[in-house]
Each structure stands twice: as C-alpha cells, then as structure tokens.
Image (cartoon, rainbow, N blue to C red):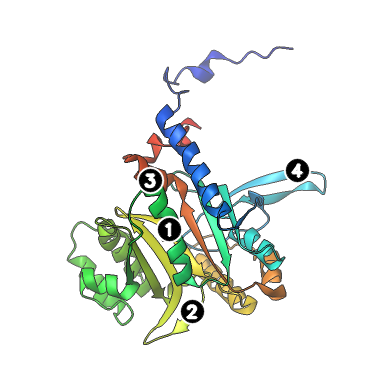
Amino acid sequence: MSVVFPDHQYAEVPDDDWRATASLECLRARAGLLQEVRAFFATRDVLEVETPLLSAATTPDPALYSMATRYRGPQYPHGKNLYLQTSPEYAMKRLLASGSGSIFQVCKAFRDGEAGRIHNPEFTLLEWYRIGYDHHMLMKEVEDLVARILGVAPDFERLTYRQVFELHTGINPHGASAELLQDYVAHCTSVSVAGMHQAGRDAWQDLIMSHIIEPQLGKERPIFIYDYPASKAALAVTREDAYPVAERFELYVLGMELANGFHELTDSREQRLRFERDNAIRVDKHMPEIETDIRMLAALDHGLPPCAGVAMGLDRLLIIRQKATSIREILAFPIERA
C-alpha cells in the first residue's frame, strides 16, 4: 500500500533545507577526530563503554533542562517517563562501582533550551573517568589530549577560580557580598541584569564569570580554572582552605568552555543532600522537581572507587580545530534541519 502525503506539508520548506550544513571537509574532520580520541585512550588502556541514552532519572541541577519522552511497551503497559541523558555520568559511575576500571565514552547528550552559535540541543560528548586520579592529574591528561588534537604545545595556563576572578575584576569571589558583586555588574553596561533583582551571591558570580570573564579566557593559550567555590561543587569533592573550595576544573579555549571535570564525590549521603538542595532551588525557581536517581546512589553506597571524571564537548573541540564560526558548520544537521 502506498501512502500519499499532502503537498501542503512541504510548501514552506526551502529547496535546499534537506542538505547538510557541514561541508564534506568537516564531516571527514569529525571522523578523524573520533579516530584520534579512540587511539588516545587505547594507548592508555582506558576501556570504551556504552550506556543508555534513556534513563529513568536525570540530574536535578537547576542550570540544566532535561528532555523527556514516554515509553509504552512490555514491562510498562501504562507507559513510563524516560529522560534523554544530559550526560552519561550517572550510568558510568554505576559501571565504575561495578568494577569496570577506568572508562571513556563518546555519546550523544541532550539539553533542552540550548541552541545558538556554539550550542545545539543534541550534541556529542566525550566523558571519561580515571581510577585513582584527582582533578590535577586529570587536568594533565585533558591537556595531553587537547594539545594533541589541536596541534598546540601541552603548556596550558592554570589559575584558581579566585585568581582569575581577582585578575579580571579585582574582587575576591569567596568573600564578596551579593551587593558588592551586583554593584560591580551595574558598572558594566554591556551586561543585562534582567530577572536578577532577587539574585544571591552565587548568581552574581555566575553572571560575572559567564559574561565578563569567560569571553577573555584562553585567547593566548588554553587555560584551566580550578578550585571553584564550594557552592558550585555539583558532584565534586570539597575541601577546607582559607575558603571552602570544590575540587573541580573547567578548560577554556578562545573564550569557550571546552571541558568540565571533578575529583568525584564518593559519599552517597552527601550526594543525596546535594540532590535535595538542587531540588529545593528548582522549587524556588518554579521548576519541576526531579526524582532522585536511586540506582546511582545505590552504586555510591556499594562503593565508588576514588576517581576523577571529565566531560568534554567534541563539537566545540571540532569548532576550534576547524576554525569554524558556528556549530552549524561542523554538524551534519543542526536542530533547525533535524
């Protein structure tokens, strides 16, 4: 039986809308990048793994918006809500707790509401975990990989969050009040403060970092920013210094965040408390609460080996390598042509 589709379904589609936005050169560069990544980890005896794109739970991080779908079939005749992963972190930690050893994964990840010059709601992520590493050891491995891919010297700059904040603003972010940070932003006329009238210190720090500091990072050479305020720990270990800090790092190249890594938290009770705090923030922001990932917490209860992990955006790495101006140039079909 043939199916005839009404002509009106195609009436407003441009003639070339079916074409890829990436050139053949960029498609070949992507294939080469994936080969280099796999070769890098093969020489270091890091196991490649796959985990599901769909999961029963997702991150409660208030800064991330998950995409959901509904499964109807065997085992769930009335249907079950599932999330498209924002990262494979939770499933990979379950593998680590199962005794996998050091692992890496190249996969698709999904984040709602993210589309722009360097964002697409569906993107390619490289994530890996190294048993026995802390964040400094993992920074070195990230440096080795990125230097190899970009053909630059493995001599990246390293500054703490406090150092880079003070360098660009003259303000100690750990000791500054929300009022001081707000006053600083008020003198930066290019930064919009819409919706910030009740913002706390963390929100003002994030605004200054993302809109004022980050665009200036990694212009001369790639730079790691590490030891973030403890309030930004997410899934990282915290430690007591002059101010509490999270053993977390981010890598910036040409003003673009490329990787986000943690010396991983292994305490299930502390992780549960952080999930609860994130959900409380979501409620305050009138966002839906997220069901706790009990399987990931059970893995932590069983015992997550001491490790460090990092997520790296391969699309952004390819943008830099190809000297592209937009993510559309290195994706076959971005969201508007999906």
Label annotation for residue 161:
none
Image quadrant assignment for residue 201: bottom left
Q: Amino acid at mark 3?
A: Ile
Q: Which one is in front in this view, the residue at disc 2 or the one at disc 4?
A: 2
The first of marks 1 and 4 along the sequence is 4
Q: Nearer the viewer, residue 141 or 204?
A: 141
Residue 276 appears left or right of 215: right
What residue sits right under mark 1 in the picture? 144
Q: Amino acid at mark 2?
A: Thr
Is residue 31 shown left or right of residue 165? right
Query: Label 3 vs label 4: CA separation?
Result: 34 Å
Q: Give me the C-alpha separation between circle 3 and circle 2.
A: 30 Å
Q: Secondary structure at mark 3?
A: loop
Image point (49%, 68%), residue name? 262
How much space separates mark 2 and mark 4, taking CA atoms? 41 Å
* Position of 105 relative to 15 (above/below): below
Q: Secondary structure at mark 2?
A: strand
Q: Alpha-carbon neighbours of circle 1 within 10 Å: few (<14), some, or many (≥20)?
A: some
Mark 2–mark 1 Cα distance, whole angstroms, equals 26 Å
Mark 1 to mark 4: distance in Å?
A: 45 Å
Q: Where is mark 2, residue-wise?
A: 238
The residue pinned by badge 4 equals 72
Q: Amino acid at mark 1?
A: Asp
Give the structural element (helix, strand or loop) at label 1.
Answer: helix
Return the x and y of residue 280 as percentages of the image width and height.
53, 71
Q: Residue at x 45, y 27 (%)?
A: 20
Q: CA distance from mark 1 to mark 3?
A: 24 Å
Of the numbered discs 2 and 4, the one sitting upstream in the chain is: 4
Q: Where's the N terminus, which quadrant? A: top right
Mark 1 vs 3, N-terminal side: 3
Q: Is residue 131 left or right of residue 284?
A: right
- Mark drawn on residue 118: 3
